[in-house]
Image (cartoon, grey):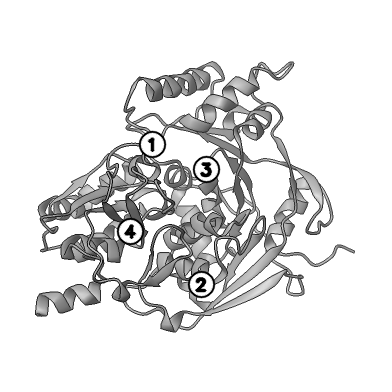
Amino acid sequence: MARPMTLTEKILAAHAGRADVSPGDIISIDLDLVMANELSAAVAITEFRKIKGATKVWDPDKIALVPSHFTPNKDIATATLSKMMRDFAEEQRIKNYFEVGRGGIEHVVLPENGMVGPGETIIGGDSHTTTYGGLGAFATGVGSTDIAAAFAIGEMWLRVPPTTKVIYEGTLRPYVAAKDLILATIGRIGVDGAIYGALEFTGPVVKELPISGRFTMANMSIEAGAKNGIFPVDATTEAYCAAVGKKNYTVYHADKDATYAGEVVIDCTHIEPQVAIPWLPENTKNASQLNDIEVHQAVIGTCTNGRIEDMRQAAEILKGRKVHPRVRAIVIPGSQKVYLQCIKEGLTEIFIEAGCVVSTPTCGPCVGGHMGVLTEGERCISTTNRNFRGRMGHVKSEVYLTGPYVAAASAVAGHIAGPEQLDKLVAA
């Protein structure tokens, strides 16, 4: 009789062809999708060509290649990387290649095109591949050599991670959303709180979260050191899958008597809009505690908060207001589809009238690449996922992580402020 298993263990056991697995087991799993961007693909392609007998990828329909980090290309070096991936896609007849202007940021593009779904195993040459756990998939980032091997055989070995259950109870306050929940969680357990573990997000508050919010939280599970973050599949998940045309998938559920490595209960009733100050995502504080910190740039979007729901949150704050004269506000929709939806809903007009620049979908400033690099002494309030030293440019610049509501309000105020503090400033 199979041992009771967590959600992550259930998926891994099925893909390993085993009745059950336990934390610490070394297994080999079949993969449903392998993804790479122009940075990880370059090394993966080089290593793939070194594999004896590997002339064709194992299944071109189960590989996705997405130029996203330095797109549109910012220089000759990044153009060379992109061409390498483009040529490989053509050579191997990989249809899921998302050219500039037809895709966007990988972790927004794949879900909205119905390429990831519940119960699947997905690896990507990017640490934030954990995003797809928002749909109840096992998804994790790996190195380029693992991607190369997966290109060849469609399998990967791994150690089964122990699972920590995180239970969200209570009710959400105004302007508190998924980004605040995950920042509060990382603030509590630390950036090393789930090293090589799985975070299983549950509880009554989770049931009410939209899929966009679940993507945000799964995306940042890696910031707690997790191997993967995962949400139970429910009616909201299945409605999303239907909307994006994802039809064939298997739903797994954690056993009621499954053994967890730990359990964290978070009362959301008292959570305020959150900000993580430099230099770690665990350095969380309430936005209301940081009103004296001046900002020079605001970034709204990217793979963590670049979906249409995030754009709507920012537009709600920016409508009828102006970005502070000393602030550069950069809005980055996560994909071309999101960008077009912003135009159709009038959000782009709101952003431009407020004084924002609206960028083509790109990882850009999040990795200090382009479209918003900081110089010495500058501070950025950002909806991105990391605030390590030098992450967005100069080693003496600073990044403060938050959600769209606070980023937009801070852009208007000229200093860190939540929407409620912004309203008070206007009233004063």
Q: Nearer the viewer, residue 356 or 120?
A: 356
Residue marked by disc 4: 310
Q: Quadrant of residue 93?
A: top right
Amino acid found under the numbered disc labelled 4: Asp
Residue marked by disc 1: 103
Check disc 1 and report its element: helix, strand or loop. Answer: loop
Q: Earlier in the sequence, mark 1 or mark 3?
A: 1
> Nearer the viewer's eye, disc 1 or disc 3?
1
Residue marked by disc 2: 207
Q: Earlier in the sequence, mark 4 or mark 1?
A: 1
Check disc 4 and report its element: helix, strand or loop. Answer: helix
Q: Is residue 425 above or below residue 342?
A: below
Q: Are marks 1 and 3 in contact (CB under 8 Å)?
A: no
Amino acid found under the numbered disc labelled 2: Lys
Total marks placed: 4
Q: Is residue 153 above or below residue 281?
A: above
Q: Is residue 96 visible?
A: no
Residue marked by disc 3: 115
Residue at 29% x, 52% y is 299
Amino acid found under the numbered disc labelled 1: Gly
Q: Is residue 268 above or below residue 233?
A: below
